[in-house]
Image (cartoon, rainbow, N blue to C red):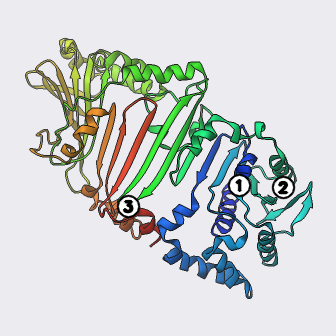
Amino acid sequence: MKHLHLLSALAVVAFIFCSCSNTDYQRVIPADASAVVKIDVKSLTEKADFSHSSANEMLGSMLAAVVKGKDVKKMQSYINDPSSMGLDFSMPVYVFMVGQHFGVSIKVDDDGDLKKSIQMLQKQGMATKPIEKESLMCGSLLDDIQYTYSSNTFLLLTSLEGGNASTGRMARQLMKQDEEDSFSSSEAHLKMNEHQEDVVIYSQLNKNNMKALSGLENLLVWLPLSKQNVQMEALNTINFDEGKIYFSVKVWGKDEMSQKLIDDANKNLRSIQATYAHPSVNMVVWGAANLKGDWLLSHMKESKQAKEMLFLMERAVDIEQMLRAVDGDVAIELQNLGNNDIAYLAQVQLSNSDFLADVDYWKQSMKEYGLSMQSRGKDAYSMQMERDTYLWGVKEKKELFFASEKANMSPAPQSVLDNYMTDIKKSKFFIYVDLAALHNTMIFQIPWWGEKLRALKSIVVKSASADEMTMVVELTDKKDNFLKLLFK
């Protein structure tokens, strides 16, 4: 709870000053920052039409409840006109993490106006009086956040471990650090500034950081990002446009070994041939890749969870032999059968079907684990696992299928995927989610939030190479901006 309190407090103060960004102010970001976020607050607030939103009205009501005296109007004016606080939001805001510290750096426009703003917060009991230390103005906000500012930089810094004195010293050190000691002198910083999206996120990818990350890089499942000694970096971007939300990620290796992992994945991921891009009328999610079985199996063995799954399956069937036979398109389709009933269908191209020779042995071995398998025709079988029945088999010796018992295995004469055929064939990994087909399900009926979700039509995820991926969320109304709907 203490950590949550600190993060929440930092977010509140940053918002107050932002609502209220000369590259010198970027120099305070330490070179060893594990994550850096560049935020175009001016663009985001304009796209959200924040000044005319109900969220702005609600914030005004909250301020009226907690701010004393005549300062309510002054605080509201800071939100409506950020420049009146002395901060320049025509420049991006930078948020960073280093060790257990979180920081926010904002460009100062007028340090005199900034001082007046802090004095107003001081009168409300939200800040301490600015005190000069080492030619810098310093103090604290909301008890746990240290602020430091000069004529061009306003820095907020807090620690998850507490310790205001040491955090204050660190803030002053960052304000005085040389360019060569700063993140702003790095190649990653240059790459960040090449992007003009609403949000740009740099992060270090290694075993220690993966649990804290939730960006698009987690969908690059062919890269062993959590493997010991792997050192990679990533840039995620987010942009809110009319009718669409764009997400992207690009990764690169920090050392030769890590870059080789990316290069090897690139060699083994092949362009999708769209062999199975004709889903059923019940399709809500469709995903595809083009894989070679030997590489797929070796990659799966790099994952502890995948190894455990292979071990469990190997007790009943020769799953390794089946995986080694994979050679070509692999497609998985989730189907909405109504009443929250979901079925799935997997289709796989094979180089051979030699594993069929062992099916009779599998039928016997399964009995030891309470499972059963019966023949349904030539190279077609059903498997009973507890209360569920699954169908599987091989067509013409070269196509493996695995499906829920109720799955619709008949392709529709026309499909929404027809509109994406060019993208599918240019991709090495592709996912389509038909959100419109899920609008009647439970999650889309949640008050307030469900209304926002029902504005979304589909999600398209695609990757043309092993080191990058894009995701596009399409809105039902091509003129809508999701940010504006969110704050409506």
Residue beneath disc 1: 105
Residue beneath disc 2: 164
Q: Amino acid at mark 3?
A: Glu
Q: Position of residue 266 (x, y in %)?
A: 41, 23
* Label 1: few (<14), some (14–19) or many (≥20) C-alpha neighbours in 10 Å: many
Residue beneath disc 3: 242
Quarter in which the C terminus is drawn: bottom left
Q: Which residue sits furthest bottom?
A: 69
Above or below 425: residue 115: below
Q: In the displayed structure, does residue 201 sit left or right of residue 9?
A: left
The quarter of the displayed image where residue 181 is located: top right
Above or below 350: residue 85: below
Q: Position of residue 79 (x, y in %)?
A: 63, 74
Q: Amino acid at mark 2?
A: Asn
- Tell me the distance, in whole angstroms, between the alpha carbons under discs 2 and 3: 43 Å
- Tell me the distance, in whole angstroms, between the alpha carbons under discs 1 and 2: 18 Å
The answer to which of 90 and 333 lies nearer the viewer is 90
Instruction: Say whether disc 2 or disc 3 marks the residue closer to the N-terminus.
Output: 2
The answer to which of 367 and 28 lies nearer the viewer is 28
Q: Amino acid at mark 1?
A: Ser
Q: In the displayed structure, does residue 62 sit left or right of residue 445?
A: right
Quarter in which the N terminus is drawn: bottom right
- Tell me the distance, in whole angstroms, between the alpha carbons under discs 3 and 1: 29 Å
